[in-house]
Image (cartoon, rainbow, N blue to C red):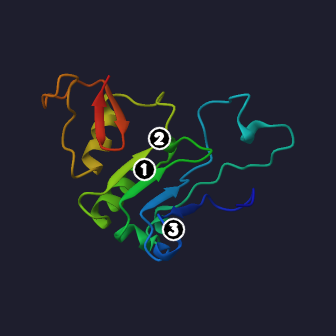
Amino acid sequence: MSNTAEPSATAASGDAHSLASPQKIYVELTRRCNLHCRMCVKYASGSSIGEEEMSLSVFKKLLSLARAKTLILNGIGEPLLHPQLDQILHFARKTMPAEALIGFQSNGLLLNGKKCCNLLSANDNSHQANDCYGSNVPCGHCQWNLGGFRCL
């Protein structure tokens, strides 16, 4: 991926014969971040990594989502900063198989009760958080993981 291109999507599969239908898809939605970590390649001396974001219309062109078992939103940026994250997650959940896992890598600093509720609403398969003891009582202290939310 070049430093000036729009954030990208890559696919990982179990073997060379399954490339037409990836099992796991990694998508970089944004290169914006709410932190400025010294070890991050984005902020390294001489880096020219911009602040681009993948649009919802580009994300919808990922036809392989319909067969993928896992979608991971990751990359240089913080996915929680993407202004269309809720719509992207809703589209992915609607397009992917019901048993598919959807998650993202985040520093978590932008998670709050409202954001957790929005993310839960976007993921039609998880309507509430499970508390630390396994009951289905939303507690407001949630953490996104591949299977949905888990309370801290």
Q: Quadrant of the N terminus?
A: bottom right
Give the mark nearest the N terminus, 2 or 1.
2
Residue at label 1?
Answer: 85
Q: Could you say whether the residue bearing mark 1 is in a helix, strand or loop?
A: helix
Give the mark nearest the N terminus, 1 or 3.
3
- 64 versus 124 height, above or below: below
Tell me which amino acid carries mark 1. Leu
Q: Residue at x 41, y 63 (%)?
A: 23
Give percent across and percent down for residue 3: 75, 56
Q: Could you say whether the residue bearing mark 2 is in a helix, strand or loop?
A: helix
Q: Quadrant of the C terminus?
A: top left
Give the mark nearest the N terminus, 3 or 2.
3
In space, the residues marked 2 and 1 are separated at their CA atoms by 7 Å
Along the line of sight, which residue is nearer the eye, 99 or 113? 99
Along the line of sight, which residue is nearer the eye, 108 or 65? 65
The image quarter containing residue 69 is bottom left
